[in-house]
């Protein structure tokens, strides 16, 4: 199996959620794994001067419409915009990063559960106790997960992950890198698919 | 035949150029025509606070790479980034708007020729005489086309077209509206295709 493809995402990113449900099957189709990178888009946006999509005049109204429409287009019927949006995503990101080093398979299951919690069930995963409860529901150790959120080493790991993402050119979510080639957005999954099949064009 | 679909574009928009080569066949496949709306993205950006894509940190580098890659992905091999970019697009936009009322078929041919001039042949179509020469090459009256660029009535028409686009929610290029449903970007042509086929989902 070749090297995994890199999947960068923020837990508050609707398009990241849509891509998260498709990326593993897409990679597996081409014999590839996925390296999941939770990042903080707010830190990235400070670098690019961007603001959250839904807060931009005209574009914000379109984005809300496009998010719901794109969810259906991609066959993810259960998507709904959370009642509080955007949210801070340190808690879910730190849990997933902490788990990655201990149980990478469980880390991905937890990432899916956290994303579903926010974009399907309207659960506020910015709350550390809530994010912990979701991780525990997947089989993670609740006390250790809750402690990880406040662990300086895990905090540093998330800062480092986000800094490395920026260094790799990441400026949005979802962001996918295949053998050094960058792709931004769930609407680029068709290009990712062809790139994986052909090695470029 | 149902009402035409609306195609908004700026002559300095690479993704607009890519979409311009596909939009007519896509509409025709569903028995629809295309109403071409040249607009000034600079005026739109003042409304949304946006800046040209290629000038944004990180995103700019990605955009240049994605433009060339997306051109090939969409089968438009001849695309090349112009040596001067972005450019002011009043001259080409005014010529096309002026022609639309006189010879709508010729107006579309001229729009294609202007776009190809800029994104295939690296010709600076911001120059009024150059834009006029391209239009004349398609069969437009050269003196009348050149005069139209400086005609206050045509200038007002372009202002009005851009203002109406903003009122319709347009914030980027290409921007396609199908029976009131807005789609942004060449990477949404697949959604436009399905929307035209199904009337929505």
Image: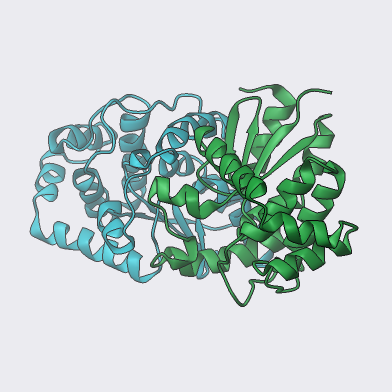
Chain colours: A cyan, B green
Left or right: residue A127 versus residue A12 is: left
As rendered, which of B110 and B19 lies closer to the eye?
A: B110
As rendered, which of B63 and A75 lies closer to the eye?
A: B63
The residue sitting at 52% across, 64% down in the picture is: B63
Using the image, determine if residue A87 lies above or below residue A198.
above
The residue sitting at 72% across, 28% down in the picture is: B196
- Outermost residue on the right side: it is B139
- Indicate the position of residue A50 as horizontal and vertical percent values: 34, 54
Using the image, determine if residue A28 lies above or below residue B27.
below
- Outermost residue on the bottom side: it is B83
In which quadrant of the rendered view does residue B78 lie? bottom right
Using the image, determine if residue A65 lies above or below residue A183.
above
The residue sitting at 44% across, 67% down in the picture is: B55
Q: How many marks?
A: 0
Using the image, determine if residue A84 lies above or below residue A93.
above
- Indicate the position of residue B96 as horizontal and vertical percent values: 74, 51
Left or right: residue A27 versus residue B82 is: left
Viewport quadrant of the N terminus of chain B: top right
Viewport quadrant of the C terminus of chain B: top right
The residue sitting at 20% across, 48% down in the picture is: A90
- Indicate the position of residue B179 as horizontal and vertical percent values: 66, 25
Q: Taking the image as drawn, is residue B61 in sight?
A: yes
As rendered, which of B109 and A181 lies closer to the eye?
A: B109
Q: Taking the image as drawn, is residue A2 in sight?
A: no
Left or right: residue B190 versus residue B105 is: left
- Indicate the position of residue B125 as horizontal and vertical percent values: 69, 67
């Amino acid at each position: 199996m070749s090297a995994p493809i890199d999947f960068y995402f923020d837990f508050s990113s609707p398009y990241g959620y849509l891509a998260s449900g498709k990326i593993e099957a897409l990679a597996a189709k081409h014999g590839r794994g996925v390296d999941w990178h939770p990042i903080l888009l707010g830190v990235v946006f400070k670098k690019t001067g961007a603001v959250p999509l839904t807060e931009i005049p005209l574009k914000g109204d379109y984005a809300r419409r496009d998010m719901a429409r794109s969810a259906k287009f991609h066959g993810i019927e259960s998507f709904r915009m959370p009642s509080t949006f955007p949210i801070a995503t340190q808690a879910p990101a730190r849990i997933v990063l902490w788990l990655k080093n201990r149980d990478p398979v469980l880390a991905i299951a937890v990432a899916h559960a956290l994303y579903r919690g926010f974009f399907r069930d309207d659960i506020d995963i910015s709350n550390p106790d809530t994010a912990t409860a979701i991780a525990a529901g997947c089989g993670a150790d609740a006390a250790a997960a809750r402690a990880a959120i406040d662990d300086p080493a895990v905090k540093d790991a998330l800062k480092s992950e986000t800094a490395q993402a920026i260094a790799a050119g990441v400026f949005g979510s979802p962001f996918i890198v295949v053998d050094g080639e960058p792709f931004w957005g769930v609407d680029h999954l068709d290009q990712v698919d062809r790139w994986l099949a052909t090695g470029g064009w």
